Amino acid sequence: MRDILPDLRARCSDGIPFALATVVAVHGSAPRDPGAVLAVDAAGTVVGSVSGGCVEGDVYEVAREVLAGAGPRVVSYGISDDEAFGVGLTCGGTIEVLVRAYATAAEREDLAAVLDLIAADLPVAEATVLSGAAETGARLVVRPALAPGTPGTPGTLGTLGSEGLDAAVTDDARGLLAQGHTGIQWYGAHGQRRMQEVAVFVRTYAPPPRMLVFGAIDHAAATARIGSFLGYRVTVCDARPAFATRERFPVADEVVCAWPHDYLEATEVDARTVICVLTHDPKFDVPLLAAALRTPAAYIGVMGSRRTHRDRLARLRAAGVDEAHLARLASPVGLDLGARTPEETAVSIAAEIIQHRWGGTGRPLGELSGAIHHPGGPTGTR
């Protein structure tokens, strides 16, 4: 959704009717994950993608039908289906796509409220009925319970058709939002647990996860660029004013001049945050890593040679850090790609972060068999 957010907001504000196709489920290998969207407006203009090109033509026709008044639909495409093969889904998986229209001003206003929250990096979840006893396309927008002083309004907007179903989905949507997960949930007609009567797709929009890069060196500039490309909100921190400058790190969302451990102890770190320590100096590294290992950060990577790593571990042990915490360190940082330049090293670091996120092996896919995409969700990073 974020990749076509400006386009959708423009159509809502300009009063342009459009249909939105959303990937709600993926089975096996498929080009896009649940939550990928494609929009088709009344003029036939297309933005976004649900399959990287495999089934876009057929989804376009379905979207035009829905926009003309056919009602919300869930369509499936799979390698075993003649129709799916005919439109080009030859990657071996199955995708399910919900197509619904935002044809009226009221529908676009409701969606615009969600888009505004996403644009402001405020958390929100959107639950949509896919099938069952409730009406297909019924929609409930859920905001988390907010701490005092947090921007936005907690609560819900819309209904899935019954008070019990709304209550159950609201609870689950808030849990999924806290974890940054998206997927289909099943309920009874009135929200009963462990029943399979109603399928509800819950799409969560959490603020971008953070990447904290410590050490304003050339490798940090490359790491900041690739972190931004991967969707992280990037902060670069260094205690040296001559190095921690906006000119050196134009892509970073934030450049901070402070002692690294002081900044880390004062900033927010959650279970999706990744920390990259590139400082190369014990007077920075040791207090910083001792503080980092007390956080719930998903990944803590540290640059340096194997000799530097051994020395660093000895200093951290002397500072009272136990073996269980030390085992969390990714050091030396990155996967073995044979990287030499700062840019190649940044790719190595990013590859390890992605591997950690999804539980990959880090081995060439050509050496492996079975599904290319790992089943299930992230292992705790995003």
Image (cartoon, rainbow, N blue to C red):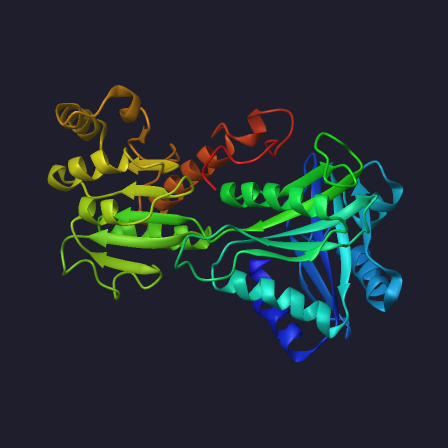
Q: Is residue 2 left or right of residue 79?
A: left
The residue at the far bottom in this view is 14
Residue 370: image x %, image y %? 65, 25
- The vertical placement of 16 against 240, above or below, is below
The residue at the far top in this view is 323
Q: Is residue 27 left or right of residue 231?
A: right
Q: Residue at x 19, y 44 (%)?
A: 261
Residue 357: image x %, image y %? 47, 36
Quarter of the image for residue 175 reads top right
Q: Residue at x 56, y 59 (%)?
A: 2
Residue 171: image x %, image y %? 60, 42
Which residue is at the front of the view, 87 or 239?
239
Which residue is at the front of the view, 291 or 316?
291
Q: Quadrant of the N terminus?
A: bottom right
- Counting the numbered discs, the total is 0
Residue 345 shows up from this direction: yes
Residue 31 shows up from this direction: no
- The vertical placement of 62 against 194, above or below, is below
Q: Residue at x 78, y 73 (%)?
A: 42
- The vertical placement of 9 against 223, above or below, is below
Which residue is at the front of the view, 58 or 149?
149
Which residue is at the front of the view, 55 or 322?
322
Residue 72: image x %, image y %? 82, 56
